Image: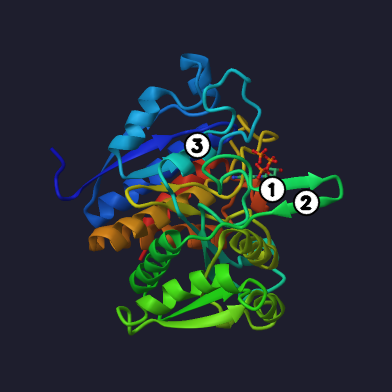
Amino acid sequence: MQQSNELRLAVLDGDGIGPEITPATLKVLNAAAKRTGLVIRAKRALIGWKGYEKYQSTLPEATKKALDEHEGWIVGPTFAGEYPKDDPVRGHPNGFIRRHYKLFANVRPVQAWPQLDPLVPEVDITVLRENTEGFYPDRNLAWGYGEFKPRDDVALALRVITGEACDRFARYAFEYARAAGLDRICVVHKRTALPQTDGLFIGAFERLQNEYRRIAIELVRIDTFSSSFPRDARHYRLVATTNLFGDILSDQASGLAGGIGLAPSLNAGPEHAMAQAVHGTAPDIAGKGVANPSALILSTALLMRWFYQRTGRQACRDAAELMETSVRRTIESGDTTPDLGGAASTEDFTRAVMRMMAKP
Ligand code: ATP
């Protein structure tokens, strides 16, 4: 039976540096949980190569069951498409997971860190990206592919925007803002050129405005955003936008903030949320014990915030804050892994983060 202070999570190591950074993340989470009155029950399951080796599937049935049975998941990086051709998930467990569990919102906070030598040190923005439709021809039709070439010199791409997806995403954005204590959402669009599709998107936010009176919406054209963000980064704290725009804007923000090195992300759906770092499997350093677990730890902090947003459990928010400040302070202390110029191993760094939790 689940106790009220208990949080049950599925934890999947993944490929490359995944088996190094995922256990490190779990240690940090357990330490934070202990201090904030939570008990973490982790169900480990296989994804990626290890799943294929044991069960001939990069997403074995036992793993799907673990995902079904747990609301929150911590997932290490997986290879993009290097799996054998007979794999039932056809190469990309992540894509399958996102579609199958309808993870419709991608949360990408981007912060400038001095260690990454940022172009714009004021960057502190969260990009909320609709994750299920838009200009993605591989996923936006029930049948067929959303890009066509009727003649050799004519190509068409189809952007799909539905009221249903806009409504659930807009509500998620308002709930996110409320839980994060933010009073404004910048809705980034190009309604001038795409009046019907972006009209639907904006309409979803405008309709909810009455329910969330303390949170303002600011409509910002994507061209205006792109030119003003580098000069006026402080103005933008929370952006909500459609799929392709979100992809581009979050990378633009990361570039200005010094790269994706420490960037966390969360993919959230109606029933589940998945913490996953933005970086990949880092095969060049896998197995060497020097991978930086910060991005996955910060992604897991986002997962704790999702639980807070969903249930109002203060201990989840406290755990998130503790993890975030401990990672930040450890990195500021210079006790870092080699990617940030230090000499610490993954284990050293993990211990340093946990020690930092004990400091006032
Ligand atoms: P993939 O194909 O899985 O995307 P990749 O090597 O193309 O892998 P990343 O995994 O994001 O892309 O790695 C890019 C660079 O950043 C590599 O040099 C890698 O070692 C480094 N890197 C990525 N993640 C980390 C990490 N957590 N700690 C230290 N270095 C990292």
Picture coordinates of residue 257 (x, y %)? 65, 66
Which residue occupies 24% across, 59% down? 311
Comes first in the chain, label 1 or label 2: 1
State the mark number for residue 155: 2
Picture coordinates of residue 175 (x, y %)? 35, 68
Q: CA distance from mark 1 to mark 2?
A: 7 Å
In this rendering, the answer to whether 28 lies above or below 46 is: below
State the mark number for residue 147: 1
Asked whether residue 358 is in view, the answer is no
At label 2, the amino acid type is Ala
The answer to whether marks 2 and 3 mark residues whose Cβ atoms lie closer than 8 Å is no
Determine which quarter of the picture holds residue 170.
bottom left
At label 3, the amino acid type is Phe
Comes first in the chain, label 2 or label 3: 3
Split into 4 quadrants, where in the image is the N terminus? top left
Split into 4 quadrants, where in the image is the C terminus? bottom left
The answer to whether marks 1 and 2 mark residues whose Cβ atoms lie closer than 8 Å is yes
At label 1, the amino acid type is Glu
State the mark number for residue 96: 3
Which residue occupies 28% across, 36% down? 69
